[in-house]
Image (cartoon, grey):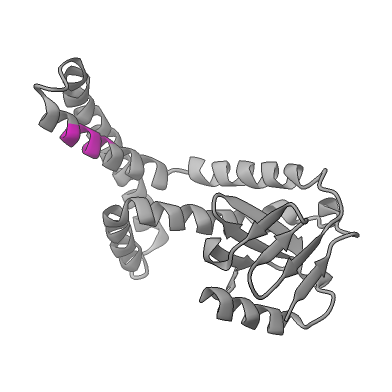
Amino acid sequence: MEFIFKTESFNIFNFKSAEEQLVEPLKKITELNSRKKVAALWKIVDGLNRRKKHVSKEVINRRIKRYRIWGFLIVLMSLFLFIPSIASPKELLVPLILSSITMVIGLFFVFSCSGSYDKRLKKSAHLLVKSLENVKNYDIAFKDDGIDLNKADFIKYSDIKLLTKTQDFYVIFYRENVTVFPINTLNNFSNDLFEEFLFDKTGLSFEYC
């Protein structure tokens, strides 16, 4: 079975809300990568998020400000250990490791509780849209053994990290890359059948954004 998306008429700027639609998929892949790198910190965040369901927005905002202050303080305290440890890394290896860990924790709380995170995602979505501006017409073929992307890149299904779907686009993250194409360009089968096919191949369901 082969699913072919014909993108000869694809123009990203025909979709007025393209940037807004791509923010959430980028947020999901960023969180997925972060969870793999700092799983312990995400356990704390998940616990805090569960508690948010039972409190008012005013209380949540106060907590966010408090967490950011704690984060700044943790970073500052870790610097007192980190700076002298760099001068003598062999003699002060343990303080160097501890200060590095605490600095990461502090920065995590500073940025995860900051509006700058959303701004960075919006900027990334803008850059992604701009990168699609000059993409030439091409077909995407989903075959039994993998994905033929523009006859220049072959993607194994095991390379796929995340499948997302917005109002107008399929957004597929693989290796360190992403491919975006319109939902309505599938040439030969239904979209439901295509999504079932990818689930069988990857074990992943499309996350709707």
Residue at the far front in the pictured view: 145
Image position of 186 (left or right of 81): right
Task: Name the image quarter holding the N terminus.
Answer: bottom right
Q: Measured along the vertical axis of the image, is residue 88 above or below residue 19?
A: above
Give the overall secondary structure of the magenta segment.
Answer: helix
Image position of 88 (left or right of 172): left
Q: Which residues are magenta?
A: 97-103
Q: Residue at x 77, y 56 (%)?
A: 151
Task: Name the image quarter holding the C terminus.
Answer: bottom right
Q: Residue at x 32, y 57 (%)?
A: 42
User: Residue 141, can we see it?
Assistant: yes
Residue 31, percent from left and from top: 45, 55
Residue at the far right in the pictured view: 9
134 in magenta: no
In the foreground, 25 or 96: 96
Location of residue 185 (image quadrant): bottom right
User: Residue 160, can we see it?
Assistant: no
